[in-house]
Image (tube, rainbow, N blue to C red):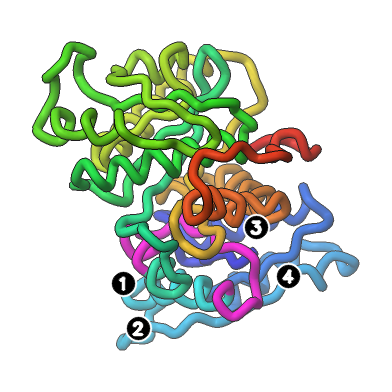
Amino acid sequence: MAVDLLGGDQAPAVVVDGALRACQADPALSLLLVGPTEAADAVLAALGPESRHRVHAVAAPTGPHGHERDISSVESGVRTAVLAVAQGRADAVISAGNTGATVTSAALGLGRWPGIRRPPLAAVLPSAAGRIVLLDVGSSVDPDEHTLAMHARLGSAYASVVHGVSAPRVGLLTIGTERGKGDRLRRAAPAVLAGLELPGGGRYVGLVEGNDVVTGAAADVVVTDGFTGNVLLKGLETAYALIGSPAPQPPLPRAAVLLGVAGTVVVCHGAASGEDLAAGIGFAATLHRRAAVPAIADFITGPAGRTPEDPLSARGGHEQ
């Protein structure tokens, strides 16, 4: 796992903490720490001698002023991490840095799948019915209806492949379920979504509201623009942290996966804690081990609508 040491509001200290937690939690995990070598050394120093072979360091280029927190230095960390995946030196990228820089670096460095113009970030939230896939949560803030249609296909494939959902229900987030509600995008998108053939036997179920994200009764996948999705995601995560999840279940990682690029890229919050970073690293490792991204890509670039013979949730291990 290639970990961006300079990604996050409290980097590199919080990333070092997360990397150490991830190594201790998963004895089979190997990390490529990208950034200041002294930060990587801190992880090595905290690990026992028997585990140090699992951690390697790669120095990222510094900015013109030679300061690790220069914008150019911070962004070079995620670019270097993406390059490591592109060159086969790592299996996934994890960053809590600037979302735009991460998405751009991944799209340019790894390449986008055919037909993908704007790769979305997909997050999984707990709901009273179990869990719900929400996308986009921060990548495309001003998409058109055709971009949302692709997001619907990606979300349906994700729910089918990763969670083993049969015939995922896909809804469009808006401010009311009456016909014609919402802004121009929300008024234009339903006609496009209604005609889609969705992967995994998915079906478009129409308009949903914010309360439906909490209950999970109306949809398994909720599609929206990145601006609205990010606001909703952060609001719900904070509410759940204060008052508890709507349903008892193992905690879900506070991280999102970038769908539509040729590699596993996981984005954590800029304000992520060490525990959050560790969960994001574990999430990326699980996605890689279960070949989730290639399976989703096969749905999107191959025959639409076929059902996977071996959904990831049935392959053993802990669902994330």
Sooner in the amino-acid sequence: mark 1 or mark 2:
2
Q: Which residue is mark 3?
A: 19
Residue 250 locus on image (x, y percent): 67, 26
Q: Which residue is mark 2?
A: 63
Snapshot quadrant of residue 30 = bottom right
Tell me, for residue 55, which label it has, or none. Answer: 4
Sooner in the amino-acid sequence: mark 3 or mark 1:
3
Residue placed at 70% from the left, 34% from the top? 313
Snapshot quadrant of residue 237 = top left
Q: Nearer the viewer, residue 29 or 307?
A: 307
Element at label 3: helix
**Compared to 243, does 282 lie above or below?**
below
Query: Which amino acid does the dot numbered 3 rest on?
Result: Ala
Asked if labels 2 and 1 touch by Cβ distance under 8 angstroms, the answer is yes
Q: CA distance from mark 3 to mark 4?
A: 9 Å
Residue 14 locus on image (x, y percent): 54, 54
Query: Which amino acid does the dot numbered 1 rest on?
Result: Ile
Asked if labels 4 and 3 touch by Cβ distance under 8 angstroms, the answer is yes
Query: Which amino acid does the dot numbered 2 rest on?
Result: Gly
Q: Is residue 142 magenta?
A: no
Q: In the rendered structure, which segment of residues is drawn in magenta?
A: 85-104
Quarter of the image where the N terminus is located: bottom right
Q: CA distance from mark 3 to mark 1?
A: 22 Å
